[in-house]
Image (cartoon, rainbow, N blue to C red):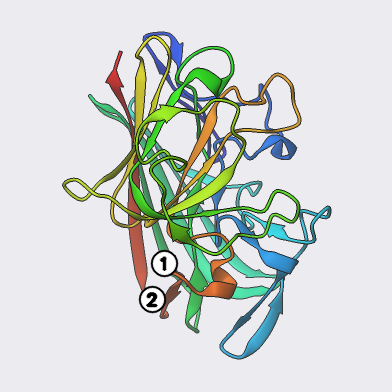
Amino acid sequence: MESDGCTLRSVEHEGRPLLSAPPELDWTQGHHGAVLAPWPGRIIDSRYRYDDLEQRVPVNEPAFGHSLHGFVFDASWQRVAVDAASVTHEITLGNKPGYPFEMHLRVTYRLDEKGICCESEWKNMGRGTAPFGLGFHPYLMAGGGVNDEWMLHVEASVSSDSDPLTKRPMPPRPTDATSDFVTPRRIGGERFSRAYGRLARHDGLAVVRVTAQDGFTIELSVDEGFRWLQVFTADVPSASLARRGIAIEPQTCPPDAFNSHEDLQRLAPGESNRASWFLRIASA
């Protein structure tokens, strides 16, 4: 396990890499391993209304005019604890343009006998009620080569695609067994960035499985703190990274939740919350 700032860059199992990422951090290639806060996904048109006030956040996706993945993915985090099996980082996010709130985040990556556990906590340190969403952006790599031959399985009741031309989220719809991977099937040549909600849970966990041709299976599971999963087929500009993994992104809310308010958290002063996700080997 290797982290840089609070970006999870690599995980291996018996010498086999489980995550895809560029050799050096490069946010233009798809936010590999990043922490996404105080919102995951996009704020469409880089504006939202909260408590009857319109807020405008900086545009960091100029081709579309949106604001993507919040403020902390490229920020300086403080490493506050480290040992042979875990590392913990913290950051206080305060009074950013369009986000006049103060939030403290703490993220721990921990190795255990089953794999990786990522624990996250956040607390409103300001004086007013604050909107908040959190996400993570690992790219799972089940095998070598591109992801076309891998099997994908996501158990969920609703999904929402991103419009490839505008990047706007489409209205949520019931999942379809023939197109949404609720029944395991090959990814093939499909290209999509899709949010899944109303996740099926087993003992409180929702699980996504990615399986390579040799049967090697990686599971990413989330506890009830993460209510959505974004799945992206890694169609990024770099030829060395394109479709070399598949992004399975735990998220507390869907894209553009600052406008839709769906599953958007509103934290009172002093209020905190937490969520965890897990990376496991299901079949080696």
Check disc 1 and give the amino acid type: Lys
Q: Are marks 1 and 2 in contact (CB under 8 Å)?
A: yes
**Disc number at residue 270?**
2
Q: Is residue 151 left or right of residue 221?
A: right
The count of marks equals: 2
What residue is shown at x 79% (from left), y 61% (from top)? 65
Callout 1: SS = strand
Say whether disc 1 or disc 2 marks the residue closer to the N-terminus. 1
Above-or-below relation of 45 to 276: below
Q: Residues within 10 Å of mark 2 (few under 14, many from 20)?
A: few
What residue is shown at x 50% (from left), y 18% (from top)? 149
What residue is shown at x 53% (from left), y 46% (from top)? 78
Along the line of sight, which residue is nearer the eye, 266 or 145?
A: 145
Callout 2: SS = loop
Residue 41 place in picture, x, y as percent: 59, 55
Residue 119 place in picture, x, y as percent: 35, 46
Above-or-below relation of 16 to 107: above
Question: Badge 1 is on which residue?
Answer: 123
